[in-house]
Every structure is written in C-alpha cells, then in structure tokens.
Image (cartoon, rainbow, N blue to C red):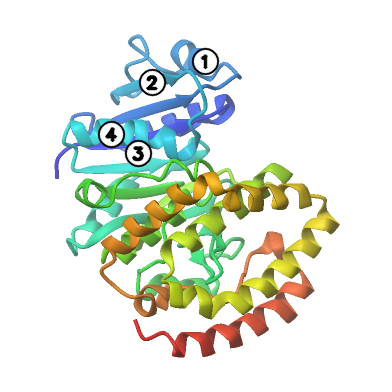
Amino acid sequence: MGRVSIIIVSYNHRDVVGDCLLSLDRAGLDPAGVRILLVDNGSADGTVDHLRRDVLRDGGSRTPGGLPVELQANGRNLGFAGGNNVALRRALAERDELVYLLNPDVEVAPGFLAAAIEALRGDERIAFVQSLVLRHGEQETVNTYGNALHFLGFGYAAGDGQRLSDAAVAARLAGPPDLAFPSGAAMLARVAALEALGLFNEEIFLYLEDLELGWRSRLAGWRVIVAPASRVYHKYGFSRGAQKYFWLERNRFLVLGWYYRLGTLLLILPAFVAMELGLWAFALWSGWWREKLRAYRYCLAPARWRSFLATRREVQRRRRIGDREVTALFTSEIVFPALDTPLLTRVANPLFSIYWRLARRLLRW
C-alpha cells in the first residue's frame, strides 16, 4: 500500500484535538507512510493558534512524535462534508491510495490503522472499513460496532452502551462484517472507490453524511465492513439540541428521496406517514417543532426541485443493485439508549418490524 492520509476536521475542538494527535503518535505509525491532513472549519475557540503554539512542532508541520501534518485553516465552517472534501480532494489529486477519516474527539489504539488496512485487503470491492468505536474512558463499552440504517432513513450507532463481554456483542463481531453504512468518526476509505463514487454530498453539510455516502456506495455495488481488531475511543455524548433535529430531519428526507426507487417510496409511504405523526407529537412535546417545519420548507421549496431531481437521476443512473438487495442490511427497529422510551420499544419497533417484514416481500428489485 502507498501513503495513507489521516483526515481530521476540527470545529471548535481545541480541548480534544491535541489528545487525538498525541494518540496517533502513540499508535506506532510510520512517518514515511502516513501523513495527517488537519482541516479547521473556522473555529472561534482558538484551535488553530493552540495547535501551532502548544501541540505541533516545526512551525505546525509535525506532531510531537514526528508525524507529518498539513494544517489548513478554512475561513468559515464548511460542515463535516465540506471540511472532509477539502482534504479528500488533496488526497485524490496527490494519488494517495487510502484515507482514514478520524473525528477530533477520538483517540486511537496502537495497531488501529494496520488492522483496518488488513481488513480491506480481502476484497477489491470493499470501499470503507469502520473501526470498532468504543467509549473513551470505558474501553470495554461499545459506542458503535457498525452504524444501523432504519428503513425510514434514521441512522444510529449500533451497539451503543453495550459491553464487549455481552454475548450479543461477541456474536455480532464474530459474524458477517458487512454494514449498512460506516461511522464517519473512524473509517478507512479506498481512494479508488471515492474516485468512482464521488466525495461527500455537501448539501448534507452536517449529520447523516456518512449514511448518504454508505448508501451510495452499496447501491453502486461496493461493500462496507467493520474491522473489530481496529479500535478507537470516542469522547461521545448524544446531543439533543433543537438545531440538530433540523439537520437530521432535512437530510433524512433528502436521502430517502434520492436513493429509494419510486416503487419502494410508495411501498414505505404508510409507514413514513405513521412515523411522521409520531415525530410531530414528539417535536411538539420536546419543543423542536419549528425545526421540523423548517425541514419541510427546505425540501418542498420549488427552487430546490430541479437540484433534487438532478441528484436523484444521477444516483439512479449509477445504481448497480436493486432495493431488495441494498435493504437486506437495513433494520426495522431503533435500538439506541438515548432514545429508549416505552412508546418506541413496545409500540413503534414491533409495529414497524411487522410492516417492513411484509413490505420487503414485495420488493422484486
């Protein structure tokens, strides 16, 4: 394998990005074969000055352990998608073979990169390898062993809060490695796949970017897998800010509209309407109903229809497999501790499981 670029996008991450870089030093990486592309998205907390003054060496070009660093400070926030694309374009132009996307609030374990690369070697159709993401400070507790994609477009960290010693976790990690989509917090990407697929969709901007890219890759016939031997530790906390719900809902609508075939959209419509009614009740009760309404306004604005349809046509043109195959890894349940309510676990999940089991029988392609 040629050079690997490790891409870190920072936005007001002054308190954690230094620890991320120091963990890379401790991981035993070869400075001759690895470089760090560090993109700052217009941080207002002094992240760039802190890195240059207190963390990096040789004018900001190396970590304390000697790994080469190329630091780019954007003048504005380009989002997760845009910030990563800045570095990805550079990696593609300079003919890197692999890139590894790493959140600034993640610390890596020794051997994380070698294990991910080893998992990639087994099949030229593997586009992305997700590391096993554990909770920082709780090294035996899972954050995600591979992200889950609900058939109504919700993505979540599968296995979050479970212990590695749990029988269900052990069985999952010993089973087939294929995922619906990888976590952008810690994933290896094959540059050849990115050249064929394109980079992150910058309209997504924030949240579900990895879901969109993973769905796109699988639709085009690529594989996404998890490498349990590649381990990282995430300083994770689930955010419930109202603004977050806007991005999640808006992007979910966009991805569903872009990627499902028309027949599949009609098939899931009753379940979609039922879920929307439940989400409206939750939004009114939780106080983020304005953000949900804003997501509707964005997606239904006539000025965006041409762009939406153009993206959908391009997605469908690149399709190599049908919805029956691509949805084989989708789930009908949301199993996530931060959203664990009796209404979800005892009513919504069982009903949607029955619906999806019946609906998938009607998918012919």
| Residue 230 shows in this picture | no
In this rendering, would 108 be left or right of 283?
Answer: left
| Residue at image mark 2 | 72
Name which residue type carries label 4: Arg
Q: Which is more foreground, mark 4 or mark 3?
A: 4
| Residue at image mark 1 | 50
Q: Which numbered disc flags the more N-terminal residue, 4 or 3?
A: 3
Q: Which numbered disc flags the more N-terminal residue, 1 or 4?
A: 1
Q: Secondary structure at mark 2?
A: strand
Cβ–Cβ under 8 Å for marks 1 and 4:
no
Q: Which numbered disc flags the more N-terminal residue, 1 or 3?
A: 3
Give the CA distance from mark 1 to mark 3.
22 Å
How packed is label 2: few (under 14 Cα within 10 Å), some, or many (20 or more)?
Answer: some
Q: Spot the residue most to the front.
A: 302
Q: Which is more foreground, mark 2 or mark 3?
A: 2
| Residue at image mark 3 | 27
Q: Position of residue 1 (x, y in %)?
A: 14, 45
Name which residue type carries label 2: Gln
In this rendering, would 46 be left or right of 120?
Answer: right
Q: Which is more foreground, mark 4 or mark 2?
A: 4
Name which residue type carries label 3: Ala
Residue at 71% of width from left, 76% of height from top?
A: 345
Residue 3 position by quadrant: top left
Residue at 50% of width from left, 35% of height from top?
A: 79
Residue 166 position by quadrant: bottom right
Give the CA distance from mark 1 to mark 4.
26 Å
On screen, 45 above or below 355? above
How packed is label 1: few (under 14 Cα within 10 Å), some, or many (20 or more)?
Answer: some
Q: Which numbered disc flags the more N-terminal residue, 2 or 1?
A: 1
Q: Which numbered disc flags the more N-terminal residue, 4 or 2?
A: 2
Q: Which is more foreground, mark 1 or mark 3?
A: 1
